[in-house]
Amino acid sequence: MHPNNLHQKSYDFDLLQACHPALSEHTFVNEYQTKTIDFSNAEAVKALNKALLHQYYDIKHWDLPENHLCPPIPNRADYIHHIADLMAPKKECKGLDVGVGANCIYPLLGSQIYGWTMVGADISEVSVTAARKNAKEAKTPIDIRLQTNPANIFEGIIQEGAYFDFTMCNPPFYASEEEAKKANMQKNRRLHLGKDTRRNFGGISNELWCNGGEALFVKRMIKQSVGFKEQVGFFTSLISKSENLPKLLKQLDKLKAFHKIVDMQQGNKKSRMLVWSFKAKN
């Protein structure tokens, strides 16, 4: 976990329950005499998120439509801190979150932690409406934009003459709904949760899967980024599967783009941030 991440230690449930009392109904003492929640319960995870956002980021009113992706806050904060390293020493930055989702979590954290000017984009009208509400409730100047053409990633969002210091993206993992369900069933079996296909973190179609999955989505993003190389300092994307990297790096080499990989790890979960630029040299 990034050294600037506030979530290095175990959750202090007494502290979290004090700022968000509704968390109490989901909290129990486990066999090791430690307070915790049932992380397979989507409502419990949402209540924990609300408490974390309130306690650590002064976000007092945050919510999600039913079944939408409920992000793990420590994991999302890590991406923000790694981007801050990339931006240093510059402090006043403008960023674009591609696929902001209903949770609006990256713009909220970027705005609250670093004071960045944030824009979020999504192809879902429901997600855009919910993200705007979350931004408004947090009293942050976040601009949420609807991408009306799902084939486009930056076109229609990055306006003529606009400049972004960075873009960020947590791309859909899976290539289909069936693949997402299969992966969740395997996870449930590992955790001895039975065969229920519900996800504790939720997620609708465009949040979890797209044609070609993560690899094809990021490949398309790289291809389209060429048209905006003068309007963006650094393009970034999370990459969950290391086996997707070789083809993506080969594509970037062909485009003569600077690129690097930043390894990220939260507990047992490993990920990486792919960074590329047509302006940076190191």
Image: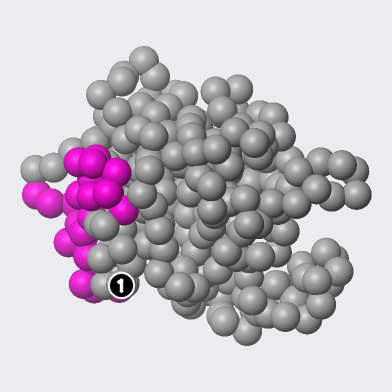
Asked if residue 46 lies left or right of residue 131, the reply is right
Residue 87, x across and y down, in percent: 38, 25
| Image quadrant where residue 9 sits | top right
Find residue 193 and report its horizontal and vertical position in percent: 80, 71
Above or below, 171 against 207 in this view is above
In the figure, is residue 49 to the left or right of 152?
Answer: right
In the figure, 19 relative to 239: above or below? above
Please name the predominant secondary structure of the magenta segment in the image.
loop
Residue 105 is a magenta residue:
no
Query: What residue did someone put label 1 on?
Result: 126
Quarter of the picture containing the C terminus is top left
- Is any part of residue 178 visible from this angle? yes
Q: Where's the N terminus, which quadrant?
A: top right
Residue under the image location 50 percent in, 38 percent down: 19
The magenta span reads: 134-160
Residue at 38%, 43% (x, y): give it: 60
Q: Amino acid at mark 1?
A: Val
Residue nearest the observer in this picture, 55 or 156: 55
